[in-house]
Image: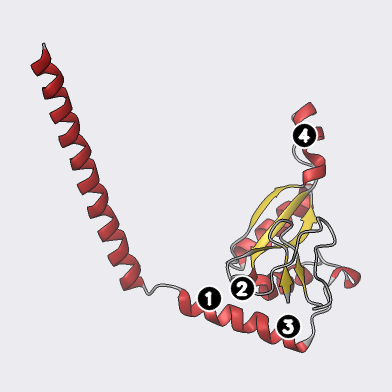
Amino acid sequence: MKYCGKCKEIYFSDNNIKCRYCGKKLISDPSSWSPVHIITANGFELERIRAAVESADIPYSYQESKNDAGIQILNSAPPENCDVFVPLSAYNDALDVLIGIGALKENDIPDIDDENKALLEDTKKNTENEELSPQKARLIRILSAIAFLIILAGVVYLTDLFTGFIKGLF
């Protein structure tokens, strides 16, 4: 499995060396959090996809397709086509959701061999293992809040010193 960091496209064939869209060299071992382009949609279809992906608790993002930017700027209309991205670790789940709601047709479904399916599953499992436990997440939030307060107190203290210095000059 290979990945284009610019186009966010995933290639399941090892024959590809460069991206077919931008010509950039492909990455052999993408991160499990790498965003992957899964579908391009617009209007009601985009809203259907967003609702389905959100209800399946799959993280996603979308952005206006590069070739539609001028039209949207000229007439302040909503974007015609938006590219939807999901993390590599959620790729299989997102495909299942899109197939389930009929957003992907038979000829749009990527052909994934068994080796790449296993690789995607391993990526998903590794991502699940990377997630923090609720206790660790709470501890990190508390430590972050304390660090923020210390930084804030330091800024106030240094500002007070600086203003005292300036007052002393006059």
Image side of residue 78 versus residue 60, left or right: right
Q: How far apart are marks 2 and 3 (CA)?
A: 12 Å
Residue depicted at x 59% and y 72%: 32
Q: Where is residue 20 in the image (x, y as percent from the top left)?
A: 85, 62
Residue type at tag 4: Gln
Counting residues from the N terminus, which is met first, the one under dot 2 or under dot 1? 2
Counting residues from the N terminus, which is met first, the one under dot 2 or under dot 4? 4
Q: Which residue bears the numbered disc 2? A: 89
Colour setup of the view: secondary structure
Counting residues from the N terminus, which is met first, the one under dot 4 or under dot 3? 4
Q: Are marks 2 and 1 in contact (CB under 8 Å)?
A: yes
Image side of residue 94 versus residue 105, left or right: left
Q: Assess disc 1: are there few (<14), some (14-19) or many (≥20) residues with their C-alpha within 10 Å of its C-alpha.
A: some
Q: Distance between the residues labelled 2 and 4?
A: 32 Å
Residue type at tag 2: Ser
Q: Distance between the residues labelled 1 and 4?
A: 36 Å
Q: Assess disc 2: are there few (<14), some (14-19) or many (≥20) residues with their C-alpha within 10 Å of its C-alpha.
A: many
Compared to residue 41, the image places residue 169 above or below, namely above
Q: Where is residue 167 in the image (x, y as percent from the top left)?
A: 11, 17
* Circle on res. 116: 3
Q: The residue tagged with tag 1: helix, strand or loop?
A: helix
Q: How far apart are marks 1 and 3 (CA)?
A: 16 Å
Q: Are marks 2 and 4 in contact (CB under 8 Å)?
A: no
Q: The residue tagged with tag 2: helix, strand or loop?
A: helix
Counting residues from the N terminus, which is met first, the one under dot 2 or under dot 3? 2
Q: Which residue bears the numbered disc 1? A: 127
Q: In which quarter of the image is the N terminus?
A: bottom right
Q: Do the residues labelled 4 and 3 touch (CB within 8 Å)?
A: no
Q: Where is residue 126 in the image (x, y as percent from the top left)?
A: 53, 80
Counting residues from the N terminus, which is met first, the one under dot 1 or under dot 4? 4
Q: Which residue bears the numbered disc 4? A: 72
